[in-house]
């Protein structure tokens, strides 16, 4: 990744990269808020059937920094993050052409639909009526920042119509 002198660093905000795990629906709601408005090309979506792991490389809007950016009158930031869903037994997509690696997708939210014996489904709702549904044996989701923050190309906070 190319960075310029204007790119931000975690050190600028006295922050460390995020590394969070979700083991229940309440934890997952926190991660959902952090990945809202994350964008990724379809090519960055991988399911390793043998390892039972589904992963996305996201360009995540740094919601946790948005208030500070506003207060200091500086541009908003994004960061590349890996979202990993463990114990993935099956992955289904609706409204998304998984063969189109260039298609840019945007996450609206992520929820857990409980099944039996601790299993269920992690559902990623995408902009444009798309969804990815991952059948999991147990809920274990990891969100980890893997790059330094960079200035959001739009220089704006994502907005949603009510």
Image: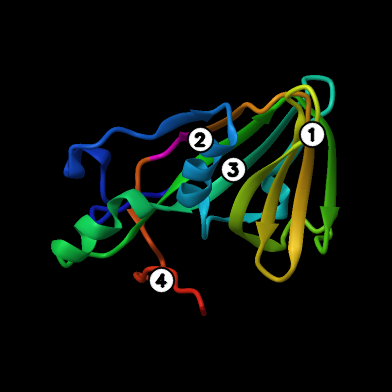
* Mark nearer the N terminus (2 vs 1): 2
Q: CA distance from mark 1 to mark 4?
A: 39 Å
Q: CA distance from mark 3 to mark 2?
A: 20 Å
* Mark nearer the N terminus (1 vs 3): 3
Q: From what the image shows, is residue 17 above or below residue 12?
A: above
* Mark nearer the N terminus (3 vs 4): 3
* Mark nearer the N terminus (1 vs 4): 1
User: Is 77 positioned to the left or the right of 47 in the image?
Assistant: left
Q: CA distance from mark 3 to mark 4?
A: 19 Å
Please state which of residues 125 and 26 is positioned toward the viewer in this rendering.
26
Q: Which residues lie in the magenta part?
A: 143-147
Residue 76: quadrant of the picture? bottom left
Neighbor class of circle 1 (other Cα within 10 Å; few <14, some 14-19, many 20+) is few
Task: Provide the residue designation for mark 2.
Answer: 27
Q: From what the image shows, is residue 97 above or below residue 51?
A: below
Task: Provide the residue designation for mark 4.
Answer: 154
User: Is 141 positioned to the left or the right of 144 in the image?
Assistant: right
The extreme front residue here reads: 116
Task: Provide the residue designation for mark 3.
Answer: 57
Neighbor class of circle 3 (other Cα within 10 Å; few <14, some 14-19, many 20+) is many
Under tag 1, what secondary structure? Answer: loop
Whether pointer 3 and pointer 4 mark residues with C-beta atoms closer than 8 Å, the reply is no
User: Is 61 positioned to the left or the right of 161 in the image?
Assistant: left
Please state which of residues 157 and 58 is positioned toward the viewer in this rendering.
157
Q: Residue at x 64, y 46 (%)?
A: 111
Residue 114 at x, y percent in the picture: 73, 36
Q: Is residue 146 magenta?
A: yes
Q: From what the image shows, is residue 144 above or below residue 152?
A: above
* Mark nearer the N terminus (2 vs 4): 2
Q: CA distance from mark 2 to mark 4?
A: 29 Å
Task: Provide the residue designation for mark 1.
Answer: 115
Mark in the foreground, 2 or 1: 1
């Amino acid at each position: 990744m190319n960075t310029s002198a204007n790119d931000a660093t975690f050190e600028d905000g006295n922050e460390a990269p995020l590394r969070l795990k979700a083991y229940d629906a309440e934890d997952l709601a926190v991660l959902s808020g952090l990945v809202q408005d994350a964008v990724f090309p379809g090519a960055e979506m991988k399911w390793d059937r043998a390892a039972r792991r589904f992963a996305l490389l996201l360009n995540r809007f740094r919601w946790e920094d948005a208030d500070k950016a506003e207060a200091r009158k500086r541009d908003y930031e994004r960061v590349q993050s890996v979202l990993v869903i463990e114990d993935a037994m099956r992955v289904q997509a609706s409204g998304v052409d998984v063969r189109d690696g260039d298609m840019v997708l945007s996450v609206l939210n992520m929820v857990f639909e409980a099944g039996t014996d601790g299993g269920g489904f992690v559902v990623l709702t995408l902009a444009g009526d798309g969804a990815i549904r991952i059948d999991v044996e147990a809920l274990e989701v990891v969100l980890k920042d893997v790059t330094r923050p960079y200035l959001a190309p739009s220089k704006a906070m994502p907005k949603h119509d009510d």
